[in-house]
Image: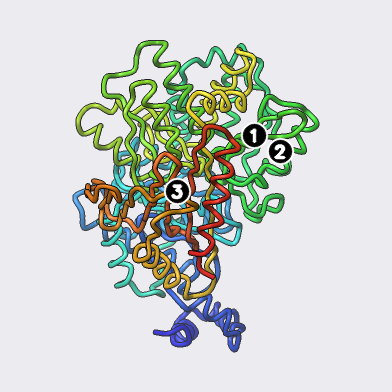
Amino acid sequence: MNYLEQYKFWLENAPVSYRDMLQSMEGNDLALKGCFGAELAFGTAGIRGVMGLGCNRLNEFTVRRTAQGIAKWLNGTELPKRCAIGYDSRHNSRTYAEICAAALAETGIKVHIYHELAPTPMLSYAVRELKCGCGIMVTASHNAGIYNGIKCYGEDGCQMTDEPAAIVYDEIQKTPYFVLPEKSFDALKTEGLIEDIPASLWSAYIDRVMQEGLNLERVKSSGLHVVYTPLCGTGNKPVREFFRRVGVKADIVSVQEKPDGDFKTCAYPNPETDAALNESYKVANEVHPDLIIGTDPDADRCAVAVPVNGEFRKLSGNELGCVLLDYILRMRSERGDLPKGAEIVKSIVSTPLADKIAEFYGVETKNVLTGFKYIGGEILRLEGLGEEDKFIFGFEESCGYLKGTYARDKDAVVATMLVCEAAAYAKENGMNLADYMDALYRQFGCYSAYVQSVELQGIEANEISKAFMANIRENTPAEVAGEKVTATVDYLSGVRKCRKCGSESRTGLPASNVFTLELGDSGKIIFRPSGTEPKIKLYYTAVGQSWDEANERMADFKAEMAGFLPK
């Protein structure tokens, strides 16, 4: 159906209580195209979209339909018929969580639901601890307040992989929009098919996170002082519990302390952006901390800024990942407990500087596709071999980090703990975390990294994205800003081609619409459509012996690529 046919279908079939709202859209072609011009698609990242009425919006009907598809998939497997559900601070998150719980419970699936806001990694932890067949997290992560979403997890606590996601999507497509629940959430809870996750699991989660500490006594004795913002999200309780246990003095950004689905003081609560910490900088100017820490609304991403000469230097996701990686490997090397065959796991779009650091400590780097489920998948592989102790650290450049195997998604709580440890170590040695990072640059070279997001507008965004990726494959440049393209890597075909010798090799990774230009020792450029938003992302790395050389090279790369971007 086209968007007008979809609109008419909703107008005629949605419950009467929604009729006035639907009728108010009549004649507004822009609104109709936005709400009915496509259907929210379920994939390995679940579904995510703007909240509102229509098949291209997140609402009680699209959420219930999604949950019914998940229920049909789970009931068709040999997996335990149990599901854990968590939710963040966004508008409707608790409502959507209850809709999902009822949709699963009415099919006989036992549902365990958090009784209050819970971080995404805590949901991953609950799936594993409660031995569930799947998990659901209601969140749109770091998106603006008009968004929400449904993330789905497998029995291992990882986000759902391609094969089950395809089955769920197929089941969703077979499911009508407007089939009302057979029983209410409260009725199903009374019957015992839905129950609250016990508070003891909160304490168990924090206990488990703290087991990943390398020297918490150092933090206790350092007198560390931080400014912390949960960005109106779920990190407030667990992160502050960690601070309390280890004696970190923490000033909380009061205007971002309480849950707020409007995110009034931070319209785009993404810790990757400097603007996300603007309110933290105001507080820091008054209390003069050692560092600033911010976690996103579902507390799976962590960002850090450091006071430097009266200003604030925010470490990028790549930089913080490298600092934490070096700190972990340094401490474990000194203790002599790095296992033989130890490995770190990072996404292909994360800085190659991490590879150099790992190599220095004699540790292997596994590069995987973007999406923390692939890092979780590598942990699962090691677990199957009885070698999960070989997993040392995993990270993505988008401020996602994990130490330990208790969860299979990025965790801002354990990242906060590691940040405090690394900061205390730096403080002991007369440095701060910015100094620590600069020391790594001096040791390994200047790796400049930049992520360019190209916003795509309208319902044609998907076609524009496809055309762009096809063009870069078909018209691959021979050089970029005077630097020869030494190799290309097409993750869709799984082939790396050496331009100099003509040889080909396999990536060994699942097919993904990602394409890389390797520029010898000078850097690389990676092209990737976003999996959750109408964007094309370009990941640049420019390497130099000095920052002048690296930054000049970066500027040249970006200028040359401007001619390839969609207009």
Residue matched to label 1? 305
Instruction: Say whether disc 1 or disc 3 marks the residue closer to the N-terminus.
Output: 1
- Res 434 visible: yes
- Bin the neighbour count of mark 2 within 10 Å (Cα to Cα): few under 14, some 14-19, many 20 and up: many
- Give left or right: position of 164 versus 196: left
Label 2, secondary structure: give it.
Answer: helix
Looking at the image, do the residues carrying marks 1 and 2 touch, with CB atoms under 8 Å apart?
yes
Seen at 54% across and 22% down, the residue is: 422
Residue matched to label 2? 280
Q: Nearer the viewer, residue 486 or 538?
A: 486
Q: Position of residue 213 (x, y in %)?
A: 47, 20
Q: Position of residue 161 (x, y in %)?
A: 30, 52
- Give left or right: position of 347 versus 501: right
- Res 192 visible: no
Seen at 32% across and 71% down, the residue is: 173
- Give the quarter of the figure containing the C terminus: bottom right
Q: Nearer the viewer, residue 385 or 110?
A: 385
Q: Position of residue 426 (x, y in %)?
A: 59, 18
- Write down the quadrant of residue 395 in the picture: top left
Seen at 35% across and 62% down, the residue is: 473
Residue matched to label 3? 483
